[in-house]
Image (tube, rainbow, N blue to C red):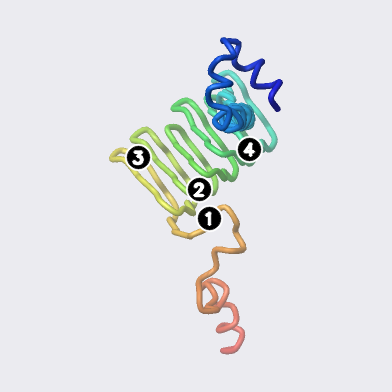
Amino acid sequence: MFSKSKINEPGSKTPDTAAPSAQPTATAAPAASDYKSSTPKAKPPASVLSSDLHITGNLKTTGDIQVEGTVEGDIRAHLLTVGETATIKGEVSADDVVINGRIVGRVRGLKVRLTSTARVEGDIIHKTIAIESGAHFEGSVQRQDDPLNPGRGAPKGGQQPAAAAQPKAEAGSK
């Protein structure tokens, strides 16, 4: 431990002998801060799918995606940005969804934002939503505390959704 302080402090040894009680504290702090600074990794930039790219299939990442082209399939990401020239046909699920282009399918997100150039044809399940003036939207909007997990968003109190309760009522009336 003392040899490490000599490496970290190339100056004269006079301050070490003047304050020996401060030396262990000084050597422990840089070692701890060096360890903590190496632990968080820099966030990688978003993966960009350019406007001339057409993907058929599902995409899944823990990172960020910016779509400018066409995707036929489901997308799961941390942050999804749909560019003005983009078209997505499938279910979208992300912590943050920013829609500038077109989505045909369900949108699930903690934070969902439809800008003035957005065109969404499908249901939006969200925790928070913002829809700018000029956005086109056809579908339903449903707020859930946990929209990313479909099974956990059921109404509280053991109530069934109206669609699930309806077939039972029709079956009883026949």
Q: Which mark is residue 135?
A: 3
Q: Which amino acid type corresponds to the residue marked 2 in the rendered image?
A: Gly
Q: Secondary structure at mark 1?
A: loop
Q: Quick check: marks 1 and 2 in contact, CB under 8 Å?
A: yes
Quarter of image, res 170: bottom right
Q: In terms of depth relative to the viewer, which is nearer, 42 or 107?
A: 42
Determine if residue 64 is in view. Answer: no
The residue at which mark 1 appears reads as: 147
Q: Earlier in the sequence, mark 3 or mark 2?
A: 2
Determine if residue 76 is in view. Answer: yes
Q: In terms of depth relative to the viewer, which is nearer, 46 or 66?
A: 46
Q: Earlier in the sequence, mark 1 or mark 2?
A: 2
Q: Which amino acid type corresponds to the residue marked 3 in the rendered image?
A: Ala
Distance of mark 3 from mark 4, alpha carbons?
28 Å
Q: Name the residue rendered at 47%, 51% in the picture.
A: 124
The residue at which mark 4 appears reads as: 62
Distance of mark 4 from mark 2, alpha carbons?
14 Å
Q: Nearer the viewer, mark 4 or mark 2?
A: 4
Quarter of image, res 65: top right
The residue at which mark 2 appears reads as: 109
